[in-house]
Each structure stands twice: as structure tokens, then as C-alpha cells.
Amino acid sequence: MNFIRNKMAGPRPHLDAVSGTVPSVSHGSMMAWFGLLILITAAYALRWPIFCGDTDLWYHMSGGRYLFEQGEIPSTSYFSFIEPEKTWVNYYWLFQTLAYGIFSGAGYFGLIGLRAALLCLLLLILFKTLLTGEQGLRRRLYFWSMFIVFYMALIPRFLLVRPHMFSYLFIVLFLYVLECRPRRIKWLPVAGLLWVNLHGVEYPVMILICLAHLLEIMIQRFRAPKDHAAVHVNRALYLVATMWTIVLNPFGTKLFSAPFIISPHVSSYIVEMRPIGWDNLINLHWLKGILENYTALNLLLLLGLLSLIRGAVTRKVRIAHVLIAIGGFYLLTRGIRHYWEGILLCIPVLKAHPLVRDRDSEAESPRILAFLVALFLTVSAVYFVQVLPIKRLAYPVSAKKLPNGVAAFLQFVDTGGSVLNGPDNGGYLNWELYPRYRIYMDLENSIFDVHDFNFGNSALHNEAALDRFIDKYDPDYISVPYTYSGFEERIKKHESYAIVFADDTDVLYANRNKQPAVVDRYGFRTINPYRLAGTDVSKMSETEREVLLAELYRLDSLFSHVNLINQAIALIHNANQDWDQAIPYAEEIIRNAPEQETGYSIKGDSYLGMGRFQDALVLYRDALGAEPEDASRLNKKIARCLTGLGQYDEAYEALQKAISPFAVDIGYKDLYEYATAALLSEQFDEALMVYEFAARRVPLDDADWVDKINERLALFEAEEDAP
């Protein structure tokens, strides 16, 4: 009987008068919440395409390919024509090998799978670290809330496939083993060996974690020599062995200097290397109603600081936790890139000193409220991952911001040679063009210093620097981004360079002195790529459109995925009312850039011209979903479709979103269209007023429109005169 009484002595479940149970936030339900969230996250992560937040992934794959093909780890600037050749410590060689190996076997789908797997594994270990051993309802809810904030802070860093993913995973893994599963410490040397070779520049973080725990063990041994002596010795030996793994890399002790040789001036052109300012630390923004990434980071830093203070005040804080947290705070001084390591290193103090009571009573806790809060947090996390601004990008890889057309053209002509490039695009061009071509540089700051960047970047922005660059290197090609304003004028001084191709990001020039055949055959004649996007083909003569169309066809035959070219071709066909011929080019734009409104809008124009109002309406609404800069233009077209479908009230509502009759810059044609929509919607007073507005703005010499507006006003006069 005593056994039964003891079993029944704990908190008993509450009963709901209707259903018999009250939802709770037990450890089992926490696992269920997490399981649901991780499944949803995995589903979304597997749908995230590879895209160009930067071009680092491609230079990593280039390094892996070099290792596979040459049988040696890349440690020189093998892909660059900079003289003299650079040498460096390749501290992420194993990541490069892994990335290229996966891509070789499974393409971009394999890289997407790798990213999703690492993210889910990190979240699993983080969840177990925060929730392990938590019994009280309030503490479970507190740590679930903290997990969700970590989730929002970490997810955006897993959009790009880069070696930092492994560093975040290993930080959490090390902390989980040392804090929650110390018996598994024997596996840390293996993890350390992998970490050092996957992303060796992070070895100081590994040393910090191990050294903090080793120092704590030494202090404990000094205070109580006989307590758990064997356990302490074993743990110390494994920690020492883990720290020694930093020399088990292909470069040995040369790795030691890798984190410390990067110039502070790098922060002037690599954003994530910039120091964290007070404006970053006090950032409080919301992303469509939920925490923005940096706001989540700052909240975790604040909680970490408060938890550390609480531990110090109660005199229960562990020396290892203090050292690790201080190391994390110090990393914040090293640049934005280390924000995430900083918050992860706060995990031990966050776990040990939560800002809630140490114990609470299940019976006294508001269990329904706790359940609703847990549900709200889980839904917020799902909403956060759902609104990330990448879901409409082309899958499995988006060419947005990539000079894929320039790369394809150079591969097609296959002349080889040197290519002066914008450094931001260097990683992709390195991947696509080596070994036939050598580029100038990418943004591997462990290879190229600030002088390399300044020379190449200045050459594309400054006339004197361009002269000096050409005198020294005389490159075969120059691939310059459209965003480098003024280059079109600066290059005119060097008459040997002519435009031979252009895509959506770069214009490619060839050196006639070195590549005369390329210039003679592919040099641009009638197209100016810098002006093409802004060309109003409807104002061109039919002959001018035919000449332009012929050259556009030639470019499209070389590489059919340039949106700029497809857009120009489709617009010309629509201007010629060749609606059917425009549609395939609009569809190509949609395939290449589903996140942009251009393709949907152009295809919608074709259907509108054909009188297919319902089909056009769907496309215009798809274009609106791409959040265009000029939504009013699309709402006007939506109104025309709805009018064609006889849905006059809806057409009037659409025009109200597009046009304000009282706008100072409103045109008389827009006023006429608005008034007509109001008339068809039987908003007679509104229609009369706006027709009168249009009558005041129409030019006196535009007789057709004067008559058109007066005819409508006459309808209202006739209505007034009617008996």
C-alpha cells in the first residue's frame, strides 16, 4: 500500500468538466510540438532553392573539384591571373570536398538535402540541450519559448550552403555533450577532428569550450582532490585530446594564424565582417508581424547577459559557463559574422540560470494558458519559415544575381583567357570558367587581400585605375555588373574593348587585340544593353523593331535564359500584336524568375490583347503576388480584365487601389478610365465628378479625347433634362 501511496503522491491531472482532460505542456507534449515543427521545417527546407546570397558556395565547389581532379588540396590562387600567385591555408578543404562530392552525385538537390539535414540535426540537439531535465511547467514553457527565438535567429543563416553551418552544429553538439551527456565525451575528439577540417578557422571557439571545462575540472580537483578523481581525469584527457585535433589538418600549425590574418579593412566591402554597432544591438524590428532575425539575436543576447548576472548574484554560476559566455560576448566585437556564435555560446548560462522560478507546481500552473502559449509559439515559428523571402525563387537553383549568361557565352566561344570580373561574382565565374579561363578574384579573403580587391574594384569604377589595370594585365575579357555605374563611358577610351554579350547581371566586353574573331562575330551592333530594359518598343517604328528583334534572336540563340533578352522579344511581339509569339518568351521569364512580376505581366498582356480576360486576370494577380514596385499599373490591368468579364463592381474596386482622382499628377486618361469604372458600377455621382476632373485636364488640342469626355458628360446632362 505504501508503494501505491508513493506513486499517487505526485501532482494529479486536472479534469475538464466537459472533455475530461486539460491540454498540458508535459515533456511528452513538448516532444510532440518539436516533432511537428521539425517535420514542417524539413518540408520547407527541402523546398528552399540554392540562390545567390553570395557566390561562396561556387568557389567552395570549385576547390572541391580541383582536389578531385588534381589530387591535391587547393592552396594557391589557381583560378586567378593575379601575379604573383597567392598561397594560403585552406581551412575548409573538407567542406569543399563534401560539397563538390554531393553535387557530383546529386546536383543541387543533394546540396539542398545536406542543408536541410544539418539544420534539422542542429535544431534537434538544441532542443535536447534546452529541454533536457526540465520538469516544471513554467520552465518547460520558458525554454520552449527560448528554442523558438533561437529558431528564428538561426534559420536565415541556413539559407546559404556554407561551412558555417557545420560550426554552428558543432558548437551546439559540444555544449550538449559537456552539459547534458558527459559520458559521451569520448566522441568529442572525433567531432573536433571533423570540425577543424570542415571549418578550421573556428578552432578558437572549440578551444574556448574545451579549455573552459578543463579549467573548471582543474579547480574542482584542487578544491576536492578525492571526489570523482577518475572521472575528472578521464574528462580532462578527452578535452586535451580534442584540443590537440587542431594540428590534425593538412596544414598543421599553419592553421593557427588563419583566424587572425584577415585585415580589418575587409569590413569595408564584406558586410558580415563589419563591426556590430549599437544600432545593431538595439535593433527591434518585426518581419510581417513576428520577430525579425536580428531582433531575435538581440533578445537572446539580452537573456544571456541577464542569466549570467543572475548566476553571479546567486553565486551558483559555473566557471566554465562564465568563460564560455564571456568568449561569446567577445566574439561580438569581431564582426556581424560572429553574432550567431555569440548567442550559441550563451546556451550554458541560459540553461543554468533561467529567468523563471526553479520549481513550480503543476497543480498551480495555468495549464490551458500554457498550452495556448506553446501553440502560439509553434505557429509563429511555422509562420516565420513560411514568409522567408525566397519561396518564389526558381528551384532547385535560382540564377538571380548570377552572371549565368556571361559564363555560358564564354563556355560557348571557348577561347580561354583572362577575365576581369566584379569580385562579388567571382565565386560563380571561378566555378563555371576554370580551367579554360582565369578570373581576377573572388571574395575569399584568406586568399586575396585589400590591395587585390582595391585594384580590381577601382579598375571597374575609376578611369585612371582602369588604365593602369589594362596596362598591367590587358585582360581578354571584362565582365562588369550593371550596378557599376559609369563604366560604359570609361571603357570608351579603350577602343579595343567591345560588347559581345550581356545577361541580367553583367555586360561582357572582349579585347579585339586578343580575341578579334569573337568581336567580329558577336560584337553588338544595334543593342545597348545598358538601355535595353528602359526601351519603349511601342514608340519605335516597325522597321526599328524588326532590326532590334533580329539581333535579339541572335543573342537568344546563344543562351535562351536571359530575362532581359526574353523580355525585349516578348514586348516587341506584343507591340506588333503578335500575341501568340510573345507568350513563349514570357513563359521562359516565369521559369527563370518566378519571383519577379515581369513574366506574368507580359503574358497577361498577351492574353488581354487576345481577349482572354480570365487567363489574363490570373496572371496579373500572380504578378501582384510578386510584390512589384508599381502595383497600381497591375491593378489597372486587373480592372480592365474584370470589366471585360462584366464584373464591374470588382473592376471599380481594383481601380480605386490604382488611381486617386485627387492626385496632383493624375492624367486625364486615367481619370476617364476611373470614371467609366464608377459609371459601370452605378456610382453615378462619383463618375460625374471624375469625368469633370478629366475635362479640366484634357489638352484642348487633343480633339478625340475632348469629344470622348464630353460625350460622357452629355449623358449626365441628358439624364438631368429627362422628365
Image (tube, rainbow, N blue to C red):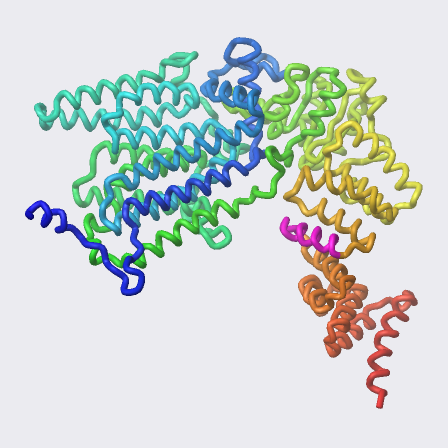
Identify the residue at horizontal 70%, vertical 53% (top origin): 620
Is residue 472 visible to the viewer in this orientation of the structure? no
What is the residue that sits farthest to the top in this orientation? 71
Q: Is residue 98 above or below residue 526?
A: above
What is the residue that sits farthest to the left in this orientation? 2
**Quadrant in the rendering for residue 595:** top right
What is the residue that sits farthest to the bottom in this orientation? 723
Q: Is residue 192 left or right of residue 689?
A: left
Q: Is residue 635 left or right of residue 354?
A: right
Q: Is residue 502 above or below residue 574?
A: above
Q: Which residues are magenta?
A: 614-629
Residue 355 drawn at (x, y percent): 26, 49
Residue 51 drawn at (x, y percent): 58, 34
Task: Let me know if residue 617 is in the magenta part.
Answer: yes
**Quadrant in the rendering for residue 517:** top right
Residue 6 drawn at (x, y percent): 10, 47
Q: Main secondary structure of the magenta part?
A: helix
Identify the residue at horizontal 27%, vertical 21% (top origin): 186
Task: Let me know if residue 72 is in the magenta part.
Answer: no
Identify the residue at horizontal 27%, vertical 65% (top origin): 17
Q: Is residue 577 left or right of residue 470?
A: right
Viewer-side residue, 656 vs 649: 649
Residue 402 drawn at (x, y percent): 64, 32
Is residue 169 visible to the viewer in this orientation of the structure? yes
